[in-house]
Amino acid sequence: MAAHPISSHSHNAADLAAVLTNTNTTLRNASLLSALALVQQLPAMFVEAEDQRPVLEMDGDPLAFSHLIPIVDMSLLKSSDPAVRASSVADIAAACEKFGFFQVVNHGVDESLIRRCETEAHTMFELPLDVKERVHRPPGTSFGYGANTWVNQTVMHWAESFHMQLHPKSNIREFSGKLFAESDPTKFSSTVEEYMGQIEKLARQLLELLTEGLGLEPTTFNHYVENERMMSMRFNLYPPCPQPELAIGLRAHTDPHLLTILHQDEVAGLQVHIDEKWITVKPRPDCFVVNVGDLFQVLSNTRYKSVLHRAAVNGTSKRLSLACFLNPPLSATVEAPPELITAERPQVYRPFTWGEYLSNAYKFHPAMGGERHERFFLERS
Ligand code: OGA
Ligand code: NI
């Protein structure tokens, strides 16, 4: 199943030399990874703290606990038998309450479109470093090609990433025009737009199902993602790592967003923190992994959980994931509806705007702590 062996990477020795002799932190931030696939020993800046290092093998079986993340067959939601549909909605709600994660199969997104989008992502990452630098993401900003970094993070992720936005204002054609100026920019941009459009439809459908699972009118939260909304996608590429046991692809985090719809290829790496253990989500290229983001935890008044997850890396195969995020507009006030505020479950968070939350989201790292959420707790008098 190892689809992309280390020898197939496109980075060359000139890239490596350029990076190793360059002390410019911008270059270092954005492109070190491209070149480092060539080194035998993990450079110090990628050596993760001992207690944060992931282990892919669990009890000898790398996928031992993957059955814990439920797979929901979305075709059952169309059943003419109301009991079948109700039981699927209940499964989704239970998964969001217990794990904050579930997977969906028969989700309606064309298999061939997923493959085409993955192909475009690989084509993009395989472009020469100086071409990718045309869409460089400056540290502290959101969109473009670079490294996923949090403020104050000292250890670098073993990953390249490329983050694009479809709404409110698409930057996809502009990025594509710069990356593929010498070839055909429309192939990349039209594939990505088509993919994100289908994922957005799926995400809206899931938003209604999750809302229904809370016992609310399914459309209760639709106003958050109607005309004005934010929809973005990050390609994450995790190259083969010379010492995967010392590195991390993406540190433990919760997603600040409303909903995340992630597609992982056939290489394992995504791990979810459940009952004090890291559970590897077994790759199923016919599935999407769906997770509750912080905003949905807030809207559900903590009935649904935004759960820590991370990406481990390996020594032999590169791994690609496509992560789509659905969000309200920055000005939207995020607040649990009165139906979910009860004597047994009092209001946990104060009302805030998504813009306010987002401006804090990458400053305060929630790994193992939750400081980020606490800033938005309701102050009790
Ligand atoms: C993310 C994420 C996991 C993965 O992009 O937020 O959690 O497997 N990605 O790439
Ligand atoms: Ni995430």
Image (spheres, helix red, strand yellow):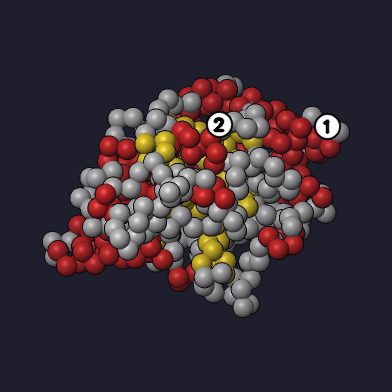
- Residue 165 in picture, x, y percent from top left: 47, 32
**Residue 175 found in image quarter:** top right
| In the image: residue 9, left or right of residue 323 | right
Q: Amino acid at mark 1?
A: Thr
- Residue 80 in picture, x, y percent from top left: 13, 61
- Residue 17 in picture, x, y percent from top left: 84, 36
| In the image: residue 136, left or right of residue 286 | right
Please give the name of the residue rendered at 62% of the width and 78% of the height, measured from the top-left corner.
Answer: 59
Total marks drawn? 2
- Residue 254 in picture, x, y percent from top left: 52, 52
* Residue bearing the label numbered 1: 23
Numbered tag placed on residue 143 in the rendering = 2
Q: Residue furthest bottom?
A: 59
Report how far apart the C-alphas of labels 1 and 2 lie in the structure.
23 Å
| In the image: residue 245, left or right of residue 264 | right
Please give the name of the residue rendered at 41% of the width and 52% of the height, measured from the top-left corner.
Answer: 348
Q: Amino acid at mark 2?
A: Phe
Helix, strand or loop status at disc 1: loop
**Residue 151 found in image quarter:** top right
Label 1 crowding class (10 Å Cα cut-off): few <14, some 14-19, many 20+?
few
Q: Residue furthest right?
A: 21
| In the image: residue 306, left or right of residue 179 | left
Residue 230 in view in this figure: no
Give 33 or 365, whichever is nearer the viewer.
365
